[in-house]
Amino acid sequence: MAGECGEETAGAAVRGLQEDAIFDNVFAEIEILELPLGSTLRSVYDDLPNAHQRFMEKLDARIRNHDREIEKMCNFHHQGFVDAITELLKVRAEAEKLKVQVIDTNRRLQDAGKEMISQTEAGIRCRIQQRNIATVVDRLQLCLPALEMYSKLKEQMNVKRYYSALKTMEQLENIYLPKTDQYRFCQIMVENLPKLREEIKEISMSDLKDFLESIRKHSDKIGETAMKQAQQQKSFNIALHKQTGTSYGKSGYTINDRIPDQENRFKWKQASEDDYEPEEESYCSDPDIVLELKNLIVVFADTLQSFGFPVNRLFDLLFEIRDQYNETLLKKWAVLFREIFEADNYSPIPLTNEEEYKVVICKFPYQDAEFDKQTFPKKLPISQSVPQIYMQVKEFIYASLKFSESLHRSSTEIDDMLRKSTNLLLTRTLSSCLQNLIKKPHIGLTELVQIIINTTHLEQACKYLEDFITNITNISPETVHTTRLYGISTFKDARHSAEGEIYTKLNQKIDEFIQLADYDWTMSEPDGRASGFLLDLINFLRSTFQVFTHLPGKVAQTACMSACKHLSTSLTQMLLDSDLKQISMGAIQQFNLDVIQCELFASSDPVPGFQGDTLQLAFIDLRQLLDLFMVWDWSTYLADYGQPSSKYLRVNPSTALTLLEKIKDTNKKNNIFSQFRKNDRDKQKLIETVVKQLRSLVNGMSQHS
């Protein structure tokens, strides 16, 4: 019986230990908030019959135990809390002292700033005075040339150099005085110039009357002799023309073809002094009047010379008039050139039959064996202005030749005069007209291409102009002292300007398309196709480069490369724009689709002649930048940075940092609860780490530079 009691007692003890272990496990699960608790509590009531009372007792004991622990902890930290409050009260006193010191420091800083402001204002006044002095110096430098020219004019009048005075007066009116017309003394000069011109006219007329009076007694004999000499000269030229078959009259006139009329006029002027009427002065803009005046002076000089009178000054006057004649010719031909350019349609000349082709060939020396093999209808590569310009240059040479006749100059001198005047026409007048034409707003890419083709053919035709002058003067261009025509350089310069304008206009059109871009920089997913503005831009470039097929290969290739580089740069600047604060990865992916279209265009050989992937290299910087972000390959980029074999060699750390900052800000904005998701937290930490390393690289570059 005693044994049985012992066994029961031992069994009860074991059951008690088991119950305690079960309760401890339940309490542990409750304390760590392991949810749900239903299964845990159910296990207690299922495994232990009548366990509710004991469970509640155990739970109360557990609670009392925790209360004692909490009370001990509070008692342990109470003194520290009291000490912290005491220290805080001490700090308040020190803070009051610091506030007083800050106020005093601010007052002394304000007092020191007043002195600095005073000195700064004095410096500003000094800079204003310096600027005013510089302005005065600039105005004086602008006025001095006008004053010097006016002084030169007065000096020329004092020494009776009236023709030179008229030239100086023209420069004053057209060049110097218009720049300074806001000053009173210049206005006075402008008011005095008509009086001075009238004074010159009166003095010249008085001198002429005195001169005519001095030869009054010889007037009848002079007139008679002049008529005889003119008739003899004309007869001699006609006989020479019949004998040699040569003449300067290539344009259908003979030397001194106007002399009979001029002779009769001269005889009427010499018939009686009572019938004398003054001619208009030699200052004019009509080349025909200047040429007529020259012929009158030549007859007059030849007549005087036959009587032994010195006529050197008259021929000196003729050389001065020659310059005036050339200037009037240049002005006249400038108008003709402008009219030709304005009337041109800048399209190849269409030819339907052989007769039309011969009409063009008669005006312009076009030669091309391959073109001759083509059947009609066909088109000449040049536009209609080319033969017209060429013919006008020849007409100018004829007009310039007219003045050189009867000046008693050798064929070499006449050849030199013609070439020099023709050079002026090409290098100054025609060149200026071409440059102005190229800059006109209505001249587009198609017109610029045609202008380049036109200037190429005009340049090739310069050798025919050389031969044309040679045929007139019989002076070989190989002669040592022969002046060469500079037309080649003129047309080369015009062509280079047109090429530069093509590059500029092409880039402007690209900019216009870029301005149509309407990216949603916060899109979560790309559209799956390239943007509409970019597809339109690619189509424009394709059609444009098809027009470039007639251009020299190098020009077309340069234009294509320039356009691709400009497009790549513009797209990159769009990504890095400071006004763009946030970019999503979806926008990056959409942007990548557009860049792929650009690369496909570059690889499609839009202009023949590029080797390999040369044209695609225009987008290499942008491609490596996008690949870095698309693949998110920062470990490779940072590890290989600075190595020649780096996969992302063309990606600048500053550029990568700028774009990454935009993406980082987007992540922060779109992931408000990202701190609760482990993947988002890890990605944000990675971005922060990469940003720090990129900043380190950028700072290192700036310190090194």
Image (cartoon, rainbow, N blue to C red):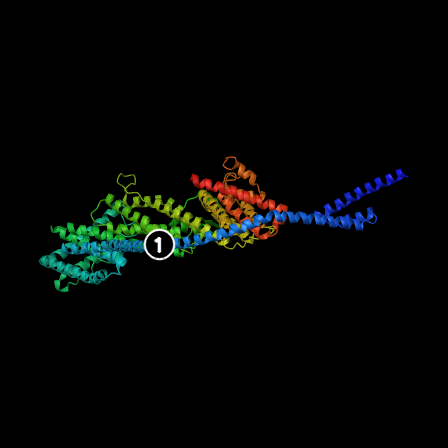
Identify the secondary structure beneath mark 1: helix
Spot the residue most to the front. 2
Residue 615 visible somewhere in the drawing: no
Q: How many marks?
A: 1
Residue 597 visible somewhere in the drawing: yes
Along the line of sight, the residue nearer the viewer: 299 or 586 = 586
The C terminus: image quadrant: top left
In the displayed structure, does residue 199 sit left or right of residue 459?
left
Amino acid carrying label 1: it is Gly
Q: Percent x, y for residue 508?
A: 45, 52
Along the line of sight, the residue nearer the viewer: 222 or 398 = 398
Q: Percent x, y for residue 30?
A: 72, 48
In the displayed structure, does residue 553 sit left or right of residue 280?
right
Q: Percent x, y for residue 224?
A: 14, 56
In the displayed structure, does residue 447 sit left or right of residue 32?
left
Q: Percent x, y for residue 425?
A: 31, 50
Spot the residue most to the right. 1
The N terminus: image quadrant: top right
Q: Which residue is labeled 1 in the image?
A: 113
> Residue at coordinates 82% horizontally, 47% vertically from top-left?
48
Along the line of sight, the residue nearer the viewer: 299 or 119 = 119
Along the line of sight, the residue nearer the viewer: 508 or 37 = 37
What is the crowding at mark 1: few (fewer than 14 residues within 10 Å), some, or many (at least 20)? few
